[in-house]
Amino acid sequence: MWARRSDSNGMISRYVLGVLLFAMALVVIAVRGPLLAVAFYAFLITAQLEMYLALRRASLQPCMWACMLFAALIYPFYLWKGLPGVVTLFVVLSTVNLVWAIFLPQRKYLDIMASMLLMIYPVWPLFLLILISQMGSGKVSTIALGIAVFSPVVTDIFAYFVGRYFGRHKLSPLISPKKTLEGALGGLVLSSLIISIAGWFVFRYYTQEVEYYHYIVLGFLCSIFAQAGDLTASAIKRFSGIKDFGNVLLGHGGVLDRIDSILLGAVAVYGYFSLFII
């Protein structure tokens, strides 16, 4: 996404798809309610299966049933007991995952670690989007969700085009050889600028519940985490020996391929709003 590519038309079509997904996300954000829960589970279960298959391609054997049970119950437990209920569920199933190895001697240490990874990623970052949708007032949560989704998309788009035309230095050749330092910096600077400009209009005409300087910090922070999320997904795919997590989007990869930057971007937004705004 940040480098020179011969198949530029294919990459542009991917970003068009990303914009369309972003537009769909805005509709879900606006409607919320049951639609948000349905969208959450559609993305969660699909992404969880893609991650499981990627780990299996790496010859690992994560405890699938415990991980999928956590994914299936995380939202009902949140509605039932709130965040403490989700943490309790996570601790119990993580313990089950560790103890399960006793009854399956063929499981190796790396299999247990793979199970723990599958318990955390992508479940927790996606769940944070649910928490973001319910933090503060309706206007504050809308702003937080908008930044969590919009900033990574804008970062990816600008990073790709800056890297394509000005990229010279490899950012992380062992993980993703086509990503460039110039692309990463271009995505960071331009995305932060756009979030800051959009934040000014939001502060001026929508609500002043979030001070303007927060938009400047959030634009910078979310862009960094979004690019880290992209690299994280690339590292997992390289480890698993796959190009894409799936093909559910008909030639444009899997769900994880399209939301990898949003996942860690959500972590940044939730953490910042929880610590400094709410």
Image: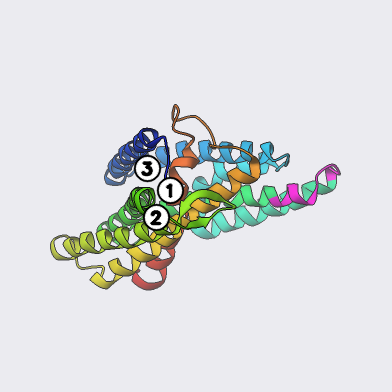
Please tell me whether mark 1 or mark 3 is closer to you in this view: 1
Q: Element under label 3?
A: helix
- In this rendered view, identify the residue nearer to me: 136 or 158: 158
The residue that disc 2 covers is 183
Query: Mark 3 is on which residue type?
Result: Leu
Alpha carbon separation for disc pair 3 and 2: 33 Å
Alpha carbon separation for disc pair 1 and 3: 34 Å
Disc 2: CA contacts within 10 A as few (<14), some (14-19) or many (>=20): many
Q: Is residue 114 left or right of residue 261?
A: right
Q: Is residue 141 left or right of residue 228?
A: left
Magenta residues, start to end:
103-113
Residue lying farthest left? 205
- Residue 61 visible in image: yes
Residue at image location 28% in from the left, 54% down from the top: 142
Residue at image location 33% in from the left, 58% down from the top: 144
- Residue 79 visible in image: no
Residue at image location 29% in from the left, 68% down from the top: 216
Residue 250 percent across, percent down from the top left: 44, 26
Assess whether mark 3 and mark 1 are in contact (beta carbons under 8 angstroms): no
Assess whether mark 2 and mark 1 are in contact (beta carbons under 8 angstroms): yes
Alpha carbon separation for disc pair 1 and 2: 7 Å
Dot 1 or dot 3, earlier in sequence: 1
The residue that disc 3 covers is 36
The residue that disc 1 covers is 3
Residue 257 percent across, percent down from the top left: 48, 41
